[in-house]
Image: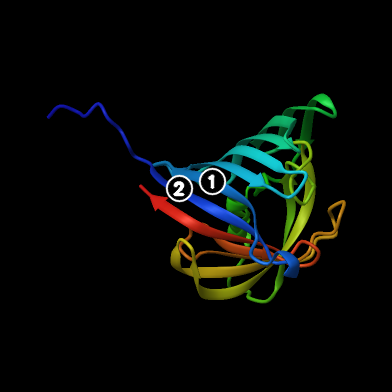
Amino acid sequence: MTKSILQRDHKSVMGRILYTSRKPERLGEERGREYFRIDTHASGARTITAHCEIDDRPNVMRDITYALDAGWMPTDCFVRLSVGDRFTGSGWFHFTPDLAECETWTAAEGRVRQTMALAKPLPTFQNHAIACDAWHLRLIDRNRPGVVQRIPQMLLSSPDHRGATGPMLHSIGVNIVYVGPEKVTVGAGTFDAWRYQFVTNVELPEEHPPYDVWCTADGDFLFLQGGVAGYMQTWYELVELEQS
């Protein structure tokens, strides 16, 4: 038999996340959106590309490409950012078991090169795509519901709540609680879900309010919905989903 010239060993998921406000004077108002594609390769390695838009003035537009190995460990990421419809910066991040590095160009700082020694391999990276927020949750033990669990080190592409600076490396620790299993219905359908909460974080330049996130209960940690309390009062919901 002649071997086919075609090869498709990966599976793909494409979706759209709607950003809305929960503030009383703006309740339900659309304030942004995110389009993403996740490719999971035959090896188990996965790559996500996402285009993110926040309409709140000054508006934010972000494009990311983020890759993880078969063990969900970050390998590399590209981030390009504009704020107020003006170029802010673009940067490439690379991770090895003992080193994180960044090559970036920003409108404020010009060319910047960063290297950061790692005591342990980096378990997760925050590039500010909402779809990736759920991927941090794989590190939390679901046998300990209601208990605050800590990720000692997470690197960020920006410490700003909207990811509107840099992109450059920034290190924090994160505290998360596993709340429990739920069934949720979003625009994209009804799913068995796991619910978590990112506890108020005082390690950022501005304290981040609590952030509840629901993801699929299938081990793929697909973002379903989430809401930030406090001064932000924002809501995020998966409204479209296509798999191939």
Secondary structure at badge 2 equals strand
* Label 1, label 2: how far apart the Cα atoms are: 8 Å
Q: How is the image coloured?
A: rainbow
Identity of the residue drawn at 41% across and 45% down? 12
Query: Going 77% across and 52% down the picture, which residue do you hit?
Result: 161
Picture coordinates of residue 154 (x, y %)?
A: 72, 50
Q: Say whether residue 140 is left or right of residue 82.
A: left
Front in this rendered view, residue 171 or 216: 216
Q: Please identify the residue farthest to the right as the structure is shown.
A: 205
Question: In the rendered image, which residue does mark 2 sit on?
Answer: 14
Instruction: Residue under label 1, please give it.
Output: 35
Q: State if disc 2 and disc 1 touch (CB < 8 Å).
A: yes
Mark 2, residues whose alpha carbon is within 10 Å: few (<14), some, or many (≥20)? Answer: some
Q: Quadrant of the N terminus?
A: top left
* Residue 100 image offset from top left, x and y in percent: 71, 36
User: In the displayed structure, does residue 36 sit left or right of residue 242?
Assistant: right
Q: Which badge, 1 or 2, comes first in the chain's sequence?
A: 2
Numbered tag placed on residue 46 in the rendering? none
What kind of residue is marked 2? Met
Residue 177's place in the image compared with 206, above or below, is: below
Q: Disc 1 on helix, strand or loop?
A: strand
* Res. 5 image quadrant: top left
Residue 6 to residue 195: above or below:
above
**Which of 184 and 40 lies nearest the eye of the viewer?**
184
Three-letter residue code for mark 1: Tyr
* Direction from residue 192 to residue 28 in the image, left or right: right
Label 1 crowd bin: few (<14), some (14–19), many (20+), radius 10 Å: many
Q: Residue furthest top?
A: 111
Residue shown at 65% from the left, 36% from the top: 96
x, y percent for residue 75: 60, 38
Report whether residue 66 is seen: yes
Q: Is the residue 148 above or below the residue 64 in the image?
A: below
